Amino acid sequence: MSIRQLALATLLIVMASARASDHLDSPTTVANPQADIGDIYAWVAPDGRRLNLIMTVQGHPFSDRIEYTLHVDSGPSFGQTTASTSVVCRFASATQVRCALGNLDVASGDPTATTGLVGRNHRLRVYAGLRDDPFYNNIKGLVAAYQTASAAIGGGASVDEAGCAHFDERTAAEILSQMSHTDGGEARNFLYNWTVSALVVSVDLEAVTGGGKLLAVWGTTASAGKRIDRMARPFVANTLLGSSPFSTDDPSGVLRQKFNQAMPADSSTFVGDLRKSLAFQDSLDGKCGNQLLAGPKPTPLRYERLATIFSDDRLWVDSASKVCSRFFAVELAALDGGATKTKDCGGRAPTYDTSNTWRSVVIAGTTDSVSDGLHQDEHPPSATEFPFLAAPDPQGVNH
């Protein structure tokens, strides 16, 4: 699909369908909301001794038919992992779970106390229950921006060989303005008071660093041995894969389902689709070629490097660092030729301004220059106090 076709499809986005950062990515997840992963979080505890992990799930409560797994791959350097440890959780009911940390520890019992359920060998702590969703996103403003870009392309804006559209200054300014506003006014969180099922796990770092200090984290759900969903970074499946961001057409659903069922190491077949979507994102500030890792010339392979990273789709965490402040920090440190001096654990903590970092990376090649007008959730989470996510609002959206 060309960027012009992508743009026309974007005009057909159904707003009511867009929820959190990885929802509606395949027909199977739509049919199984209790297996639909909303977000994955992974970061190092301030004492440098534990890795904190969170999987949020769309449906309530957790299902006794679904296996919920947090995968932690480890290796000596970015992009290379040589060992893997998983936390696998099965629920008999909302108040009865069994979570196994490889063959190192098992936590069984009621996971709903906010103090956490501790494993037999004290290497694992688990909480599971309803919490406020820490993800915030001005989806309505974002969709309006996409529609303005699409209309400009449909109206004749030129598209280069790499697939990036060239907007005039006025159109680019309008796109970025709409992205940071809602209906022309103050930005509003489309996920205001959203409630999710949250699986929260804290594990000893020594248990998951067998291959090295760099960790690559991802989550999956499965039933009867068949994968249903796969998730790590936000905005990959439902935004970068498909005929358009948040598209609900059948071919987009089939593509996302294939992505969910692939292993990270076997995802190179999706690079071509990701390149096209990254070209569209790069165009949104009116400056083609300034996206992170974009090639110097407008050829079809201009967005190959970043597309390859997104196809692998794992959250990278530097477990040697106790400082955790920014999404994509490990990737930036590994890819900028050593220019990044600050040592940050990266990954994704629930306190990060992740969605704006993501936009800045794919639109402008920075970490903080593009915003959707929102910078925190209405119920601030914690990166230090287990179970990290705020209690669900009594008036929250309970689906």
Image (spheres, grey):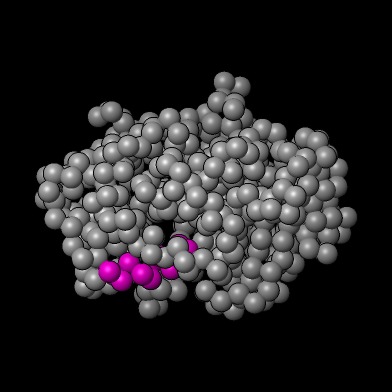
The boundaries of the magenta stretch are: 300-311
Residue 256 location in percent, x, y? 50, 51
Instruction: Please tell me which residue lies in front, 17 or 204.
Output: 17
Quadrant (top left, top right, bottom left, bottom right) of the N terminus: bottom left
Q: On the image, which quarter does residue 182 sit in?
A: top left
**Res 122 visible:** no
Above or below for 61 versus 301? above
Instruction: Please tell me which residue lies in front, 174 or 24.
Output: 24
Instruction: Please tell me which residue lies in front, 18 or 134.
Output: 18
Residue 185 location in percent, x, y? 27, 28
23 within the magenta span: no
Residue drawn at x 72%, y 61% as measured from the top left: 86
Main secondary-structure element of the magenta-colored stretch: helix
Residue drawn at x 70%, y 33% as measured from the top left: 61
Residue 374 location in percent, x, y? 38, 39
Task: Specify whether 51 is left or right of 304.
Answer: right
Task: Specify whether 372 is left or right of 197.
Answer: left
**Res 285 visible:** yes
Residue 395 location in percent, x, y? 57, 20
Q: On the image, which quarter does residue 328 sit in?
A: bottom left
Task: Specify whether 363 is left or right of 344.
Answer: left
Task: Specify whether 289 is left or right of 49.
Answer: left
- Residue extending furthest toward the top: 395
Q: On the image, which quarter does residue 397 sit in?
A: top right
Q: How many marks?
A: 0
Above or below for 307 versus 384? below
Residue drawn at x 61%, y 30% as measured from the top left: 392
- Residue extending furthest toward the front: 250
Above or below for 5 versus 81? above
Quadrant (top left, top right, bottom left, bottom right) of the C terminus: top right
Residue drawn at x 54%, y 31% as measured from the top left: 194
